[in-house]
Amino acid sequence: MIEKYKVSGMTCAGCANVVSRLLLNVESVKNVQVNLSEKEVVLETDQPLRLEGLSKALKSSPYQISSGG
C-alpha cells in the first residue's frame, strides 16, 4: 500500500532524515520517501496505518504529521 501524509516542521535535509528514520520504526512501514518542498511523506506499507501510530512515532521530535498528503 502507498499512503501520503503531510509533515509540518521540516526545513532541511536533516529534518527529512530524522522523519524518515522515525517513521521506518513504525511496524509495517517498509519504505519512506520524503518530499521536503511539499512537506509530505509517502509511505509504503504492508497494511493500512493509523494516524495516531504515526503521530506517536514523531512524538519525541518537533514534527507533526497529518492526513492529506
Image (cartoon, helix red, strand yellow):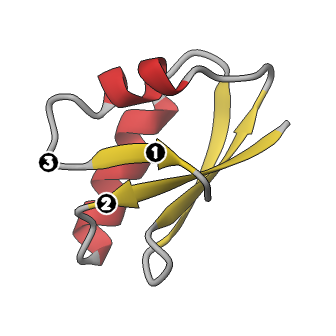
- Mark 3 crowdedness (10 Å alpha carbons): few <14, some 14-19, many ≥20: few
Residue flagged by tag 3: what amino acid is it? Pro
Position of residue 31 measured from the top left corner of the image (x, y, whole percent): 65, 44
Q: Nearer the viewer, residue 42 or 51?
A: 51
State which mark lies toward you, 1 or 3.
1
Looking at the picture, does residue 12 appear above or below residue 5?
A: below
Position of residue 59 measured from the top left corner of the image (x, y, whole percent): 21, 29
Q: Which residue is mark 3?
A: 62
Specify the quadrant that holds the N terminus. top right
Q: Residue at x 39, y 56 (%)?
A: 7
Q: Which residue is mark 1?
A: 66
**First in residue order: circle 2 vs circle 1:** 2
Q: Which residue is farthest front? A: 68
Q: For numbered disc 1, what is the local secondary structure?
A: strand
Whole-number angstrom distance, CA of label 2 to CA of label 1: 8 Å
Badge 3 vs badge 2, beta-carbon distance below 8 Å: no
Whole-number angstrom distance, CA of label 1 to CA of label 3: 14 Å
Q: Which residue is farthest bottom? A: 37
Q: Is residue 46 left or right of residue 15?
A: right
Q: Residue at x 46, y 45 (%)?
A: 66
Q: Nearer the viewer, residue 58 or 28?
A: 58
Instruction: Quadrant for residue 13, please give it.
Output: bottom left
Q: For numbered disc 3, what is the local secondary structure?
A: loop
Residue flagged by tag 1: what amino acid is it? Ser
Specify the quadrant that holds the C terminus. bottom right
**First in residue order: circle 3 vs circle 2:** 2
- Mark 1 crowdedness (10 Å alpha carbons): few <14, some 14-19, many ≥20: some
Q: Which residue is mark 2?
A: 8
Looking at the picture, does residue 56 appear above or below residue 38?
A: above
